[in-house]
Image (cartoon, rainbow, N blue to C red):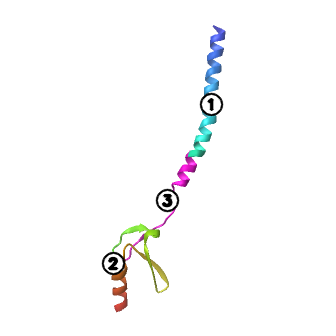
Amino acid sequence: MKLLILLLLGYFCWRALKNWVLSGSQTQENVSSAHRDAIDDIMVKDPVCGVYFPKRDGIGLTYKGEELYFCSQECKAKFAHTHNET
């Protein structure tokens, strides 16, 4: 009976140790994959239509020293037309 209890205790200790060691490596793997999939772009707002979009997808225009981004060529053209009249 004592031998059976010792074997069961040893088995549970081995499993706990195994899970503890594996959980540390899985945590690092999850962090790495989360870091790899992280969004690395800034969202900007189109000054004409108000839509938010990733800056990398925007169409840039420098106006009075300020860098503006537009969601489409149409919005950029509307802005240019409106601000060239004044």
Q: Which residues are magenta?
A: 30-47
Q: Quadrant of residue 16?
A: top right
Q: Earlier in the sequence, mark 2 or mark 1?
A: 1
Q: Residue at x 63, y 19 (%)?
A: 9
Tell me the mark number nearer the camera, choosing from 2 and 1.
2
For marks 3 and 2, give the CA distance.
27 Å
Query: Percent position (x, y) of residue 46?
Result: 38, 73
Going by the numbered disc 2, the residue's amino acid type is Glu
Looking at the rendered image, the quarter that the N terminus falls into is: top right
Q: Is residue 33 magenta?
A: yes
Residue depicted at 49% across the width and 64% down the height: 41
Q: Position of residue 83 (x, y in %)?
A: 37, 87
- According to the image, label 3 marks what residue? 39
Q: Is residue 72 magenta?
A: no
Furthest-top residue in this view: 1
| First in residue order: circle 1 vs circle 3 | 1
- Report, in whole angstroms, how far the alpha carbon at label 1 lies from the one at label 3: 34 Å
Is 46 rendered above or below residue 77?
above
* Circle on res. 74: 2
Residue at horizontal 41 percent and vertical 67 percent from the top: 53
Query: Which is more N-terminal, label 2 or label 3?
Result: 3
Judged by depth in the image, the label closer to the viewer, 3 or 2, is 2
The amino acid on which the numbered mark 3 sits, given as a three-letter code, is: Ile
| Amino acid type indicated by mark 1 | Lys
Is 24 placed left or right of 54 in the picture? right
Q: Using the image, tell me which numbered label, if any, was put on residue 18.
A: 1
At a point 64% along the width and 35% down the height, the residue shown is: 21
